[in-house]
Image (cartoon, helix red, strand yellow):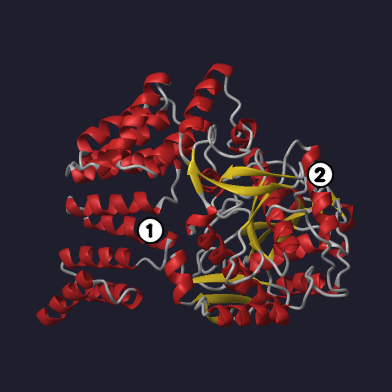
Amino acid sequence: MTSKLSDAYKLEKQDHDKIISPEATIENFKNNTAKAGLNILKETRRIDNGRLDIPVYFSVCGHDAHVLTGTKKQMGKGVSPILAEASAVMELAERFSLYRFKTAPENIKKETQENASSPLPFSLIAASVLDDRSEETMAVSREFFSKLPFQWVKAYNVTRDKEMSIPLDWFFMINEFNGSSAGNCLEEAVLQGGCEIVERHVCAIICKEKKSVPYIDPQSVTNPSTRELIAKFESAGIKLYINDFSLNTGIPTVGVLAYDPATFPETSEIVWTAGTASSPDKALSRALTEVAQLAGDFNTPSNYVASGLPKFTNLHQADYIITPLDTNTGETIPLSALPDISSANIRDEIKALTRELSRLGFELMVLDTTDPQLKVPACYTIVPGTCFRERAENSSIVMFCAKHIYENNAPVAALSQLDKISGMLPGQYFISFYQGLCHLAMGVPDKALGYLKQALTENPTRQDIPSICSYAGVCLKEMEQYEEALTILKKGIDIDDEREDIFNLMGFCHFMLKQHPQSIDCFRRVLELKPGSAIDHASIASNYREMGEKEKAMDFYEMALAIDPGLEFARTNLEKLQGSI
């Protein structure tokens, strides 16, 4: 995107903030793919079971989309079936367009910042990872960053109203898909991407600081479709906690925590999510439909992946959100008290969004990722300096430079560069960590283990310790030192008991030590976190096989094969067991 935004007027009196109807959105997408000869969408499918009667859709990837993105489906939500279906289709368009853009050589110039045309100022690079280190450390960071090759692309800085080059792979490494969006016009996409970044920003602050935020009185909601959404949750017995997450942004964000006392924790989860939009009502509607998308109707074994907000596994963890409302000690406000930047013209909403971000010291930048064949407007929106919960605490430019070096070079070449950084900035745990990963990739687990153990002594952030322990466990597993592996893996799980990779490693180590009941417990824990894991069903089966419990072993091998028919070792073992009876 290298030009100014245009006027984009919404359809009047609709339950959406779009310039055309959802029917037209779907029709345009299908017409464009047909004209381009692209097999992007195989089908759309409604997947909710009807308990809440809030529609959730899959868009199942066609061959071209699956090969390009590596995903099988995208999800969509909305207050009506046609809106949810259109949402699912546009989610697929967004993902396809971004991957197409990233892999098209004509879009990218791989070069250093020193050689890039009108590069993003280094101050915004530092802001992108919230790096405010000492002047001396920043000088070293600037030197390393400026000499690393990145994928530079032309983007539009809406705040400064000018074109500049940005390092796409740097921002994708930091933010991943956060800020990626598609719309019926570029303005729709820009607004959605910007709102998503604001949503993640306020969520990160609220969950990190456990901020006390006002409750929103459901009775103050006036939009009939939003009132109907709330009524559907209430009629199903779902408890809702609706909060104002806007903080000081001047942009409306609504948080919703929901759970079903009748089915939690047996067949449902606590869902906590948020929505940001130009108006308070649309922010609330977005949050409520997101709850429905994640919840699996609160009566299925679906397991959602936490993103902007953490996933609580028990009500005690959610105490600071739940208790003030339940005890009437929290502040309650009407929905109309939230800030409102809405307008009939989406261009004006983007201007208001940009103004509020600028007031907070942030700049809004947009990369136009619209695919020339698909022709669905899409973009990747970036706001350096905003918070992101999934990002490492105390992150720095050097930390992400080390990660970039490891991920974009052969192990020997990466190790050479990491050794150089280590010489200039000794005692940095993340450098030792990536040095360890290089040695592990080179097939030298004992040397890798030394670096990983060193990283644990260099004051790593608490959230990074489980990852260090996990890779140390991999090294010890490769070295067949299973007892020591279990000791170090337990240190990781004591900090984060939702790491399926660590439980899987522990299950393997217990299996090799013939500690089969403990191994089964670990693999069952993986399945609680990832119910669709065929390999972990098969691993439980192998334990039962070793314990002589053939019937249970066959049951779990069959479950594994039902999920993944191509799991040959499970099929072989099942056939052997069947032949032995």
Going by the picture, which residue comes out furthest to the left? 580
Kind of residue sitting beneath label 2: Glu
Give the number of the mark in front: 1 or 2. 2
Asked whether 201 or 172 is in front, the reply is 172
Q: Earlier in the sequence, mark 1 or mark 2?
A: 2
Q: Residue at x 29, y 50 (%)?
A: 506
Q: What secondary structure is found at the residue carrying circle 2?
A: helix
Measuring from the top left, give residue 458's x and y in whole percent: 40, 25
Q: Residue at x 27, y 74 (%)?
A: 566
Looking at the image, residue 74 sits to the left or right of residue 25; the answer is left
Measuring from the top left, give residue 557's x and y in whole percent: 26, 73
Q: Which residue in the protein does label 2 denote?
A: 356
Asked whether 81 or 570 is in front, the reply is 81
260 lies above or below 325: below
Marks 1 and 2, Cα distance to the nearest angstrom? 43 Å
All told, the count of numbered labels is 2
> Marks 1 and 2: CB-CB under 8 Å?
no
Measuring from the top left, give residue 77's x and y in whole percent: 65, 71
Q: Which residue in the protein does label 1 denote?
A: 526
Kind of residue sitting beneath label 1: Val
